[in-house]
Image (spheres, rainbow, N blue to C red):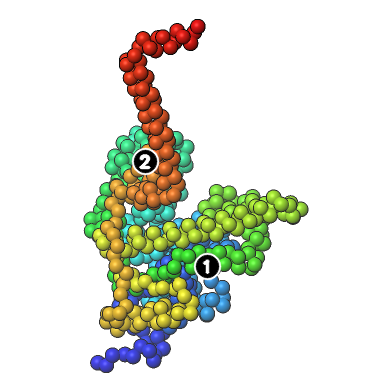
């Protein structure tokens, strides 16, 4: 049978079940500002696909500028799913995202369309790619997962009264009752019911300790045992086998300094488009809603967006106060912080890709890097290679040898290395996980502390040396001619 020429056909009409098995979905990951949206739209248009948003803040309606939702113009008529479909205040997590995304993926496959997953919340992407949720493969929302990276779901609160007995304690409402306990009480409970998790997490934050207790209470099994089963199943320290082994994953990259300039420019453009007015309007609307719904729910949704907290000191000022020098300073600081924290988030996104997708001891799909640094070379370095890779995979062939996937860079951290507490003695600070500890050791702040310690040690050593030399000199002088010293002293007293 002659091979189909994919360059000259309508992809929406040409795709069939066999081809979809070769490319069940396309995934576009990368740091903010690298061009993920542009590439995803181009691929969806070319191959007759539809886009599924995987950004935890863009699932909410409102704050379109702050969360940088794709505009109607940028979408180019391509259907976008899970974008702005939740109201502020809704509790939404990775488990709910996964279930909703699965239903959309199944529907698109039934229509012979390729789903294109795009977004910067990478643990959302991870929930689609890997089978790392326990007991939820039926797709029903029986349980609800936290945003932890272990993938073990927490069950939704039972509407009927149900008592939990953990470590000899009775809990009428597990979540609420655990919240009332001190951190030391939580540690004691965890040590009794799950010593392995306690060893890994006893110095962790309250959320992670509570998490392990919740898993034990709701499943009757140790959190550590469940995670170990996941790892054994996949032969990976992260756990979970690939759900879509043939997924095509693109990693949008950009030179760091160029990305920093883009982030700065993007924030400036957001300000010009009315970011302050958007945040102000949203804040007023939420204050009204807060009278009707739980304040806590809002703190867990759009209020987490980078930029909201940074701009609030200015937004909270009255119109009269905004003309003052204090207001101008607050606005300038807010904009600066927004740029800094956006860049920090971009760095975090890149670390996730390297630590989760480019590891040797995990079942991972090929990851195809694309350099979006130069907009003038977009077609050459991004669009054309991406199309060629998808087309080759749809034909059941390997892409051209000149196009290579990213090399696997490292071994994945073990659970102990990811959760163990590491202490930096010079700085007097604890760090959860070897990655965070290594980042700290390479940071300028840590190096400055070490330099200060060395200077102090050098000064102490110098002082001790001078004291020793002086003592030796006094001893030599006194032992060589004691009478002369006495005579001098007597002469001085005359």
Q: SS class of the residue under badge 1? A: helix
User: Residue sitting at 23 percent across and 55 percent down?
Assistant: 232
Depth check: give the residue in front, 434 or 277: 434
- Residues at marks 1 and 2 touching, judged by CB atoms closer than 8 Å: no
Q: x and y percent of residue 309 in the render?
A: 58, 53
Identify the residue position indicated by label 1 in the image.
262
- Location of the N terminus by quadrant is bottom left
161 sits to left or right of 334: left
Q: Is residue 218 above or below residue 459?
A: below
425 or 104: which is nearer to us? Answer: 425
Residue 230 appears in the picture as rendered: no
Classify residue 48 by image quadrant. Answer: bottom left
Q: Which mark is residue 311?
A: none
Residue ranking furthest to the right: 320
Reading the chain from its start, which is encountered first: label 1 or label 2?
1
Kindly identify which numbered label has been placed on residue 423: 2
Q: Residue at x 44, y 40 (%)?
A: 452
Res 459 seen here: yes
Percent position (x, y) of residue 20?
Answer: 33, 78
Dot 2, crowdedness within 10 Å: few (<14), some or many (≥20)?
few
Q: Is residue 28 left or right of residue 274?
A: left
Q: Position of residue 261 (x, y in %)?
A: 52, 66
| Residue sitting at x 28%, y 42% | 196
Q: Is residue 391 above or below residue 176?
A: below
Using the numbered discs, state the Cα–Cα distance from disc 1 to disc 2 in whole angstroms: 36 Å
The residue located at (35%, 61%) in the rendering is 354
């Amino acid at each position: 049978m002659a091979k189909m020429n994919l360059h000259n056909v309508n992809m929406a009409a040409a795709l069939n079940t066999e081809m979809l098995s070769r490319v069940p979905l396309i995934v576009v990951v990368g740091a903010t500002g690298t061009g993920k949206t542009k590439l995803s739209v181009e691929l969806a248009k070319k191959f007759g696909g539809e886009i599924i948003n995987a950004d935890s803040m863009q699932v909410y309606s409102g704050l379109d500028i702050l969360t940088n939702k794709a505009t109607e113009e940028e979408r180019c008529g391509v259907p976008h799913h899970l974008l702005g479909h939740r109201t502020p205040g809704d509790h939404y997590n990775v488990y709910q995202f996964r279930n909703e995304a699965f239903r959309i993926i199944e529907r698109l496959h039934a229509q012979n369309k390729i789903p294109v997953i795009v977004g910067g919340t990478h643990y959302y992407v991870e929930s689609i790619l890997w089978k790392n949720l326990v007991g939820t493969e039926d797709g029903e929302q029986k349980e609800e997962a936290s945003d932890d990276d272990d993938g073990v779901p927490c069950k939704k609160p039972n509407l009927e009264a149900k008592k939990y007995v953990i470590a000899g304690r009775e809990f009428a409402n597990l979540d609420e009752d655990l919240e009332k306990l001190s951190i030391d009480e939580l540690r004691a409970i965890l040590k009794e019911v799950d010593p392995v998790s306690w060893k890994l997490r006893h110095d962790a934050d309250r959320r992670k300790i509570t998490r392990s207790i919740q898993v034990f209470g709701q499943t009757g099994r140790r959190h550590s045992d469940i995670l170990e089963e996941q790892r054994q199943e996949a032969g990976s320290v992260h756990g979970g086998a690939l759900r879509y082994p043939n997924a095509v994953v693109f990693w949008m990259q950009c030179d760091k300094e160029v990305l920093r300039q883009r982030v700065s420019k993007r924030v400036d453009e957001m300000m010009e488009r009315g970011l302050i007015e958007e945040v102000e309007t949203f804040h007023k609307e939420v204050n009204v809603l807060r009278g009707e719904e739980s304040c806590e729910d809002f703190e867990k949704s759009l209020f987490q967006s980078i930029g909201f907290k940074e701009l609030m000191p200015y937004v909270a000022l009255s119109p009269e106060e905004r003309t003052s020098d204090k207001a101008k300073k607050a606005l300038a600081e807010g904009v600066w912080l927004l740029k800094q924290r956006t860049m920090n988030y971009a760095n975090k996104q890149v670390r996730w890709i390297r630590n989760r997708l480019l590891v040797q001891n995990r079942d991972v799909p090929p990851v195809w890097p694309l350099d979006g640094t130069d907009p003038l070379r977009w077609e050459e370095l991004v669009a054309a290679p991406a199309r060629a890779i998808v087309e080759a995979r749809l034909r059941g062939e390997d892409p051209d040898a000149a196009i290579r996937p990213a090399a696997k860079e490292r071994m994945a951290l073990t659970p102990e290395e990811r959760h163990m507490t590491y202490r930096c003695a010079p700085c007097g600070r604890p760090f959860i996980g070897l990655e965070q500890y290594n980042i700290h050791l390479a940071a300028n702040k840590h190096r400055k502390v070490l330099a200060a310690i060395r200077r102090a040690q050098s000064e102490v050593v110098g002082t001790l040396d001078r004291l020793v030399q002086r003592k030796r000199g006094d001893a030599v002088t006194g032992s060589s001619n004691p009478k002369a010293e006495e005579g001098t002293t007597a002469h001085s007293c005359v």
